[in-house]
Image (cartoon, rainbow, N blue to C red):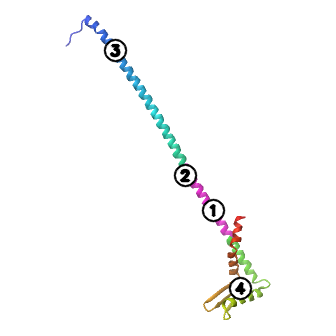
Amino acid sequence: MSRPLTSIADAALDPVRTALRAAAHADAAEALRKARQRKDELLADARRTAEEMLATARADGEAEATAVVNTRLAQSRRDARRSVLEAQRDLYDELQQRCRVAATALAEGPGSEELRRHLAERAVAQLGSDVTVTDCADGGVLASAGDRQLDLTLPTLAERALERSGAEVAQLWRA
C-alpha cells in the first residue's frame, strides 16, 4: 500500500489538479463542440437526403401518373375510334340493305318488264348471242354462256352501284 500524502505535498499538487481539471473541462468542451458540430452536419445531410428522396419520389410519381394518363387517353381514343367505325359500319350495312330492298322493289313496279328486257339485252351484248338468260325472283337476270357468267340481279346491281359511290358515301361520315 501507498502512504498518504502529507499536507505540504497535497497542497503542492493543487495547481496540478486544477490544471488537469481545466484541461479535462477544455477537452470535454471541445468534444462536446465537435459532437454538436457532427450532429448538425449529420442532420443537414439527412435533410438534404430526405429532400432529394422526396424530389425523386415526386418526379417518379409524376412520370408514372403521366404514363398512366397517356395510356388511358390512348385507350379512350382507340375506344372512341372503334365506336365511330362500328357506327359507320352499322349505317353502311343499313344503307346497303335499303338499297337492296329498293332494287328488289323495282322488279314489282311499273316498267319492270322493260327493265328485264334491257338487262337481257345487256347480257347478250356482253356474252354473245348463245347466252342463256334466267329470270331471278328478286328481280334482274342471271346469264351464262359456256363457262362465263354474268350476274345482273337487281340486288347485285344495287350493291355494285353503292360500291362505286364510295366517295359520296364517305361524305356521310364527314357531315
In this figure, which residue is indicated by the disc labeled 3?
A: 21
Asked if residue 21 lies left or right of residue 57, the reply is left
State whether residue 89 is above or below residue 111: above
Task: Name the secondary structure under disc 2.
Answer: helix
Q: Nearer the viewer, mark 3 or mark 4?
A: 3
Q: Earlier in the sequence, mark 1 or mark 3?
A: 3
Horizontal and vertical percent for residue 20?
A: 32, 15
Mark seen at residue 67: 2
Q: Amino acid at mark 2?
A: Ala
- The first of marks 1 and 2 along the sequence is 2
* Label 3 vs 4, first from the N-terminus: 3
Q: Please name the residue that numbered disc 4 is placed on.
A: 140
C-alpha gap between disc 2 and disc 3: 67 Å
Mark-to-mark CA distance, 1 and 3: 88 Å
Tell me residue 6's x, y (percent). 24, 6
Amino acid on which the number 1 mark rests in the picture: Arg
- Mark 1: secondary structure: helix
The amino acid sitting under disc 4 is Gly
2 horizontally vs 134: left or right:
left
Give the residue displayed 48% in from the left and 35% down from the top.
48
Q: In screen coordinates, is 114 left or right of 35? A: right
Which sits earlier in the primary sequence, circle 4 or circle 1? Answer: 1
Residue beneath the point at 29% across and 6% down: 11
